[in-house]
Image: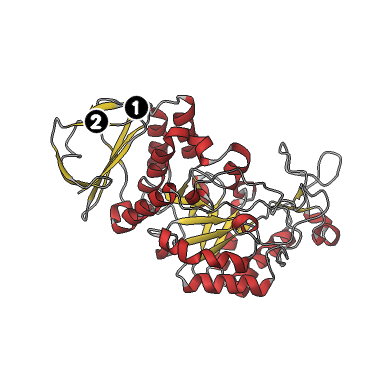
Amino acid sequence: MDHTPKNYVQIVSPVWAKDAIIYQINTRQFTSVGTFNAAQSHFPRLKSLGVDILWIMPIHPIGVKNRKGTLGSPYAVQDYYGVNPEFGDLSAFQDFVKTAHSFGFKVIIDWVCNHSAWDNHLVEDHPKWYARDYKGDFTPTPWWDWNDVIDFDYQSIELREYIAKAMRYWVEVADIDGFRCDVAGFIPNDFWAAVRADLETIKPIFMLAEWESKDLHQNAFDMTYAWSWNEIMHGITCNGLPISKLFKYYSWNEKSYPAEAHRMTFVSNHDKNAWDGTQQEQFQDGLEAAIVLSVIGEGMPLIHNGQEAGETKRLAFFERDPIHWQEHHIGDLYQRLIQLKKSHSALHNAQWGARMIHVANSEPERIFSFVRTDKNSKIFVVLNLSSHSLQVNFTGSLFLGEYDSFFENKSLVFKQYSELTIAPWGYQIYVN
């Protein structure tokens, strides 16, 4: 019997993901006109912000039958080979990708293959490719209110071949760099593995799963959602959830997930914004502390379009509702944190970065503190996840040393009994 350890992850993430920041674009709301061409006007600003990967919400025509609202959900796909005329045509999208590449961005598109619109041509052409309910009828995804779509049946080999070829088409024709896959856990892993292997014959790609499962990292996906991180931080900032829940998340993340796994940490996305509330509603006074942890802790941070402008409203999902763009201190905070992340290898993503190491402190129920360190630098982070001003000291030796305060123009030395005063929901980053 061979007990030699084997590497769990069988895929290789592109090296450009090592310190990448991902940014979500809702084309419909991103500009006043809602087109691919207009969205390009934001490229210089996004480059300055520090963005690397542009995730574009579904680009395909939207179904009319059982449509929600006036314009419908972009996740009700009517044609996998088409482009939503609301946004432009194929040429406009190709130009978007080409221009994005000239700025140094990578582009991934949202891919919806658990279900289609009721009036996708496949319903008429290949009805056997669809799942059926107990009555034998087409069926939306069980238990959800997604009545504008109907589910596929991935027992069909022909369906698998069709979807795989459609994904290959967009890499070949538009030169995209990967996919964000909607409800990826609803699709069999063997399908994703086959797709990943096929796409890699064209170019190195990046795959993001809207799911939170270690198994997806083995041979298909580079990154999964850190849904539980988001839920825990919301619970701490709004509902009195204990900090120990964060320990549980990071323990699970370190021990269960392979080092090569990218986890997407976020305080907002299109689902959270539309259905649960803006970043301010979701994190209240703890918003900035949550943003700091999302960028400087382990994980690849996501910025949902409009966050950097203060995310002033819940964007309508089925109507036109353009973002209100403005200068905002949240954008400044993201920009500074991203610059720090990119300039220190200990803060890089997945296996390129350093693990977070807990630093015990005298306020364990209210202060979250940790170090990330490698041969090049050491970053010491202290977050007050409470509404009280606190004085805190730390135990152990890991935090000891001389640091520059990232948010203050001063240097300081942490000794064994050094005490720090930190404001309610305050945060500090110290760089050695």
Look at the picture and state if 382 lies above or below 210. above
Look at the picture and state if 332 lies above or below 142. below
**What residue lies at 33% left-to-right and 58% top-to-bottom?**
342
Q: Amino acid at mark 1?
A: Arg
Number of disc labels: 2
* Of callouts 1 and 2, the N-terminal one: 1
Image side of residue 56 versus residue 258, left or right: right
As drawn, the label of residue 421 is: 2
Q: Between 22 and 16, which is closer to the camera in this rendering?
A: 22
Q: Position of residue 37 (x, y in %)?
A: 61, 69
Q: Amino acid at mark 2?
A: Thr
Residue 353 in view of the camera = no
Q: Position of residue 95 (x, y in %)?
A: 59, 74
- Could you tell me if the residues under marks 1 and 2 are in contact, i.e. CB atoms within 8 Å? no
Residue 115 in view of the camera = yes
Mark 1–mark 2 distance (CA, rounded to whole Å): 13 Å
Q: Between 132 and 417, which is closer to the camera in this rendering?
A: 417
Q: Quadrant of residue 16?
A: bottom left
Image side of residue 373 versus residue 240, left or right: left
Q: Quadrant of residue 428?
A: top left
Q: Which residue is mark 1?
A: 366
Under tag 1, what secondary structure? loop
**What residue lies at 82% left-to-right and 48% top-to-bottom?**
66
Look at the picture and state if 389 lies above or below 141. above
Q: Position of residue 285 (x, y in %)?
A: 43, 33
**What residue lies at 48% left-to-right and 74% top-to-bottom?**
102
Image side of residue 346 versus residue 237, left or right: left
Of tags 1 and 2, the one toward the viewer is 2
- Few, some or many C-alpha atoms within 10 Å of disc 2 (few <14, some 14-19, many ≥20)? few
- Few, some or many C-alpha atoms within 10 Å of disc 1 (few <14, some 14-19, many ≥20)? many
Under tag 2, what secondary structure? strand
Q: Position of residue 427 (x, y in %)?
A: 32, 38
